Image (spheres, grey):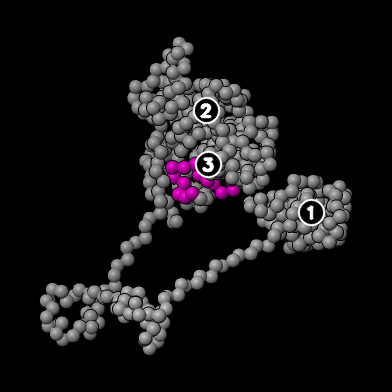
Amino acid sequence: MTSNDVISATVNDNVVSKAAYRFKVWNLLENKDLVNFPRPCKGRIPNFVDNMLAAAKLSTLEVFKKAEVVKVNMDKPQEMVRFTVLEEGKTLVISMARLSEGVLTKIIPPEDATRSDLTFACKSRAISKYGKAVGLDEKIHVDLVVMGSVAVSKEGHRIGKGEGFSDLEFALMAATGTVDENTVVVTTVHDEQVFDTLPHELFQSFDVPVDYIVTPTQVIEVTPRLPKPQGIIWGAVSDRRLQLVPVLKTLRDKEIESGKECPLKDVDSEPEERIKPYFRRPPPYRRRPPFNRQMDQRRRTDTERSSSPPAQEHKRRTRFFHRQRKQGPNDARGGRPDRKSRNYIENKENRPDQDRPVRRVQRRFYTKPRPPVDFSVKVGNIGSTMRVRDLKAALQEKGVRPRDITWKGARGFAFLHFAKDAEQPEKPTAVDDVIASLQGLKVKCQHEDGKEETILSVEPAKPISRIENAGVTSV
């Protein structure tokens, strides 16, 4: 996609509005190729590049470590954040799609979930399998809220994609007591999405500010923190939005029964409608090659040229392709007769033998049986220059021979899988013996600057088979 294809819709740059900043960020990210699939990013929370680095920086914050219940939006750039929450053993809470059936959904993966199960649990299609709806009367307190943004300022102002559902979700959680003034709001964005300041007149009391801005390269703490909405401002809700969100109507009926006045706004001026994504342009129409009059006249006979009217001489003649009949048993080349041929139909009763059925050979696929794994050992402190062959050479010096190795060098660790010896099944392999023999394991790495020696950390780990672990590369 070229830069000309990206700028398919623009706004007036002279008008200061949230939509102007959205289009500015969308066009900037597309022109600099700073977004991943889905593209183009217009009308979406941009799936910025290196979002995994931003999720890793978020996991190192003290507010993330102390949080027990974390609410994360279901946008694509925050998928790694949802995985980190589940991997750390925290409670993951997500929002319903467009608040159609409720406010929150709790993701509860199985207790023995593998890494592939956690990866699947982070996707939207896993809600029906692992999701459990949280009712309005259920008492749950969210410690940390992670939101996606299109643009954000270092002062804490946030601009979303223009639908207003993120602000409405936070207001509903504040009205039900799910969040309070101690709840921390974090957003993960690219550095190009961060502004020093945004016009204050664009933001109202129902806009949710952020407390931390996490990018792939830095962490920005907003000081002082801006006030957050403590409930639903009914004067900013229209009757149309009330009909679209059933849970909003239910909450309003409860507040009216308790004696609270909940007037709606008179004019239906909701936040900007969602901008439909722009797809790739269709390929250009290919014109037919120019008509060759001389070649066409060669195909015609003298009679056809004389009988054809002058107005139709430039038209191309229609070509007919006849299907060749299969050869019968009495033909020169032999072969199986055609069922629709006249010779086959007339001699059907006099044929001594019937047609033999065609034998189809079924292809068989054989897979090598996977060896069982009794236990696994996690090896950490793996550098970026280390390779699998370096680890294997160090293990061979120690006399340790694992059955299999799951390599995750990009993340700084690997798993060694052990099982009983096939030749000596009565001799068990103990975890303590393997860890004791691997203590102080040194690996020598060869790179451009020279040799480097690294001491690895060894600890027991949960067994991970190659079949269960679909998201990693097994060696």
Q: Which mark is residue 374?
A: none
Q: Residue at x 43, y 35 (%)?
A: 163
Residue type at numbered disc 3: Ser
**Measured from the top left, where is residue 15 in percent x and y?**
38, 36
- Residue sitting nearer the eye, 252 or 157: 252
Residue 112 placement: quadrant:
top right
Please tell me whether mark 2 sits on a helix, a strand or a loop: helix
Ranked by sequence position, the earlier of labels 2 and 1 is: 2
Mark 2 and mark 1: Cα distance apart in space: 48 Å
Which numbered disc flags the more N-terminal residue, 3 or 1?
3
Q: Secondary structure at mark 1?
A: strand
Pick the front one: 255 or 341:
341
Callout 2 environment at 10 Å: few (<14), some (14 to 19), or many (20+)? many
In this picture, which residue range is highlighted in magenta? 38-51
Q: Quadrant of residue 367?
A: bottom right
Q: Position of residue 128 (x, y in %)?
A: 53, 39
Q: Amino acid at mark 2?
A: Phe
Q: Is residue 469 above or below residue 60?
A: below
Could you tell me which residue is drawn at 53 percent across and 41 percent down?
A: 124
Which residue was labeled with disc 3?
124
The residue tagged with tag 3: helix, strand or loop? helix
Decide whether residue 42 is among the magenta residues. Answer: yes
Q: Measure the alpha-carbon separation of dots 3 and 1.
A: 36 Å
Cα–Cα gap, marks 3 and 2: 20 Å
First in residue order: circle 3 vs circle 2: 3
Residue 170: mark: 2
Residue furthest to the top: 259
**Point 70% across, 58% down: residue:** 370
Query: Mark on residue 418?
Result: 1
